[in-house]
Image (cartoon, rainbow, N blue to C red):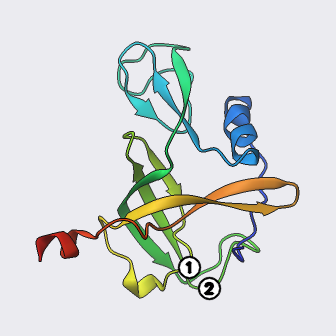
Amino acid sequence: MHSQDASFTPSSSLLTPYFDALDRHELTTTRCTCCGVGQFPPRTACSFCGTFDAFEWLTTAGKGTIWTFGVFHKMYFPNFGPDPYNVAVIELDEGTKLISNVVDVDNSELEIGMRVRAVFVDAGGHSAVRFELDPDAQTAHEKES
């Protein structure tokens, strides 16, 4: 479906549930069970309230907005994608932010605030999440007019 290589090996056992969910084409994040703040990647201590080992996994709807992005003209990882490529921080509707890519759009068309939805890329027996523009959503510019 998408040309980017999806292979990635988790470096922490805390991420195992995340990668297992991706293989089922589900996007999950964590939330602190004490203060309710969402965070990703999962941590042994909440970055907001400091409570240890108090997080739960949530399945998200996979929709959000581009919070910020950059366009890279240097390839830092082999087989990562076409050059140049974008790296975007996506703020999910559930409040958690993830770093990913927005695919199937020209980088010059990207804008902060654009609505996106998760798509799953399969390669090497595993899945990764990328985002595409949400065709069911209006951009901030369309809402203003």
Residue 12 appears in the rendering: no
Q: Which residue is at a point 44% across and 66% down the rendered structure image? A: 134
Distance Cα–Cα, label 1 vs label 2 = 13 Å
Left or right of 46 in this view: 22? right
**Label 2 SS:** loop
Above or below, comparing residue 65 to residue 39 in the picture: below
Quarter assignment of residue 5 = bottom right
Q: Which residue is at a point 51% across and 50% down the rendered structure image? A: 62
Residue 17 x/y as whole percent: 70, 32
Quarter assignment of residue 56 = top right
Quadrant of the drawing holding the C terminus: bottom left
Residue 65 x/y as whole percent: 36, 58
* Residue bearing mark 2: 83
**Which is more toward the observer, 45 or 143?**
143
* Nearer the camera: disc 1 or disc 2: 1
* Residue bearing mark 1: 104
The single residue placed furthest to the left in the displayed view is 145
Kind of residue at badge 2: Asp
**Which is more toward the observer, 55 or 59?**
59
